[in-house]
Amino acid sequence: MDNDNIYLKPMLKTVSIVLQILLLLSVNEVAVCHAKVELNENGGEDAARNEVARLLEWSYACRSYQTNKIDTDFTLQMDIDLTGIVWVPIGDWTIPYTGTFNGNGHKITGLYVEGKIEAGFFGGVGRGGVVKDLHIEGGIVSGSGTTGGICGVNKGGLIEGCSFSSGVVECKGRFAIGGICGSNTNIGNIIGCVVRDTEVGCLHRGSSSGGIVGVNDGLIAACLVSGGQVGNESSFIPVGGITYKNNGRIVSCMAMPQRMGKTAPFPGGITYENSGIVTYSLWKKGRGVALGITEDLNPYPQQKNCLKIDENSDRDEHFLAMNKFLKKGKISWRWTILSTKDKTLEPYRIK
């Protein structure tokens, strides 16, 4: 028996290595899944590597089972680093992810996505799908189509409490691009999300760049863009602090990017084009709604109770009104003041 164990242990190690190689090589599999993945808890000094392997196993299952569903749940157990791995987005427009991915408040560093039509950690999230409390730091998402830091297309799902920080989200075509999602459909919800110190933009005319979402047809609520840059400085492409084009609702959001790219004729502080509703939101750069809206007096009913922020702005009254409106809308997020000195605001989920 002892002799058997001598040969068995190296064999198991070899099988494990081969499995990990197969996971990394399977990047061209069709993005569909309907498999059960066992969620194992690992401890010790190899815990982080085990968690990466567990995530890759889930990803591989999502891309290899030939069904018309991608609904396997996953809960992240700790912070992980994906440096050295080319991540293949989960789901797409045709077969979006409809399970629950719980980031559990943990962060993923080293995310790298390149050249996908629907690009992001997820390519597409569908109706019934939930992505929550996932934080991506220092990631690079470079798409050839609709592109976002968390998902390319939110096709009716819920993206809640997620963030993308200190990274780059870029698009190489005439598509929608945003720090959280490229596009958000009319039944999609993006709530309590933050894009911080990130460059979001596209070089192509005809693209739609927004700090949170490129094109919004659904709901964006209690979201923040802070620092970084929205838009590209080398070309005159219209951009918006929260979204390039809003056909849906933007509620109690803050657009505070450090820089806005060169745009024609000027950037939209909250949104560049608006045919929806923008209410109780703050912005720093450009005009609140670029087309036809003045900064200090809005004659259009689509933009209500919004305020441009500068050094002399008194935000207290507006801050309270933003929270009151979220409560009225039964949205379980509020704004809190992180710094009393400069009155920096941050969204948080209420219990």
Image (cartoon, rainbow, N blue to C red):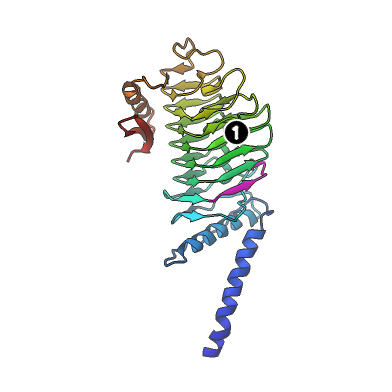
Amino acid type, residue under disc 1 in the picture: Gly
Name the residue located 65 percent from the left edge and 63 percent from the top edge. Answer: 22
The reply to whether the magenta stretch includes residue 113 is yes
Give the mark count.
Answer: 1
Query: Left or right: 287 with respect to 93?
Result: left
Instruction: Identify which residue, 90 or 49, lies in the foreground.
Output: 49
Question: Which of the 4 image quarters holds residue 61?
Answer: bottom right
Q: Is residue 53 visible?
A: yes
Q: Position of residue 288 (x, y in %)?
A: 49, 19
Which residue has dot 1 on it?
Answer: 201
Bounds of the magenta segment? 110-119
Callout 1 environment at 10 Å: few (<14), some (14 to 19), or many (20+)? Answer: many
The reply to whether the magenta stretch includes residue 248 is no
Instruction: Identify which residue, 222 or 82, lies in the foreground.
Output: 82
Q: Position of residue 176 (x, y in %)?
A: 62, 32
Q: Is residue 120 visible?
A: no
